[in-house]
Amino acid sequence: MPRIRKIKPTTIASTRRLNLFIRIMKYFNGFPLIGIYLSTCYYTYLLPESVYSWNDIDYRKVYIMIFFQDGIHSVIHKLFHTVSFLKKYHLEHHKNIKPTIYDAFDAHIIDSLGSVILPSHLNIILHEPNKSTVIFFGAIYSFWLIYIHSQPNTTFEKWLDKNLYKIGMVSPSFHRRHHSHLKENLSHIFTIFS
């Protein structure tokens, strides 16, 4: 009879941490791609000259860029749901009907290029923000993508989820409906684009 080996609790904890790290890296496959794209464009001087200067954040420009990003993304997102060649790449993101924060950047490379990187690049080229504005825009947009893929748990989160829609903002429940009804709720920030 084979001998049963006992596993130490520290080994179990280490294994759980390793599994969590592997899960995060697997699910955030679009995130490293964005970093590679931005670094390559930045260090090869493919971005407007304004991006290379540190100035105060231009909040008006941040709002314009977020609005533009969501509008362009919504059009491209609709193409990823209707054009058969693109649909197969985007369906990977919809494998979970109840998305979690891990699903925010879980996308095929073609989907990430078309849905996030192309609109971001157009945004930077057209609006010529400074470095601080680009960083602030990127942080807000990334945070919002993670937020709409979350599951509201606390009383405040549930209240926020319910009331964001009333002011024209996409909430986790609004976006969750998109994951189960693929042709509805295509925007990520403003409901006006859906």
Image (cartoon, rainbow, N blue to C red):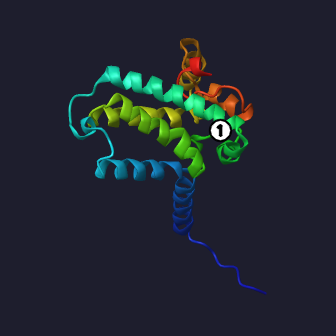
- Pick the quarter of the image with the C terminus: top right
Instruction: Classify 188 as above or below 168.
Output: below
| Residue 153 visible in this rendered orientation of the protein | no
- Give the residue type that dot 1 points to: Phe
Q: Nearer the viewer, residue 130 or 30?
A: 130
Toward which corner of the image does residue 51 lie, by quadrant? top left
* Total numbered circles: 1
Instruction: Classify 54 as above or below 36.
Output: above
Instruction: Classify 131 as above or below 2.
Output: above
| Residue 20 visible in this rendered orientation of the protein | yes
Residue 191, percent from left and from top:
58, 19
Residue 159 left/right relative to 131: right
Residue farthest along the top direction in this orientation: 166
* Residue ID for mark 1: 80
Residue 3, percent from left and from top:
71, 84
Residue at point 52% right, 37% down? 146
Instruction: Classify 88 as above or below 77.
Output: below
Residue at point 21% right, 36% down? 54
Residue farthest along the right direction in this orientation: 1
- Pick the quarter of the image with the N terminus: bottom right
Mark 1: few/some/many CA within 10 Å (<14, 14-19, 20+): many
Residue at point 60% right, 72% down? 7
Toward which corner of the image does residue 85 lie, by quadrant? top right
Residue 66 left/right relative to 174: left
Q: Nearer the viewer, residue 17 or 123?
A: 123
Residue at point 51% right, 65% down? 14
Residue 101, percent from left and from top:
56, 41
Mark 1 falls on what kind of element? helix
Residue 131, percent from left and from top:
27, 37
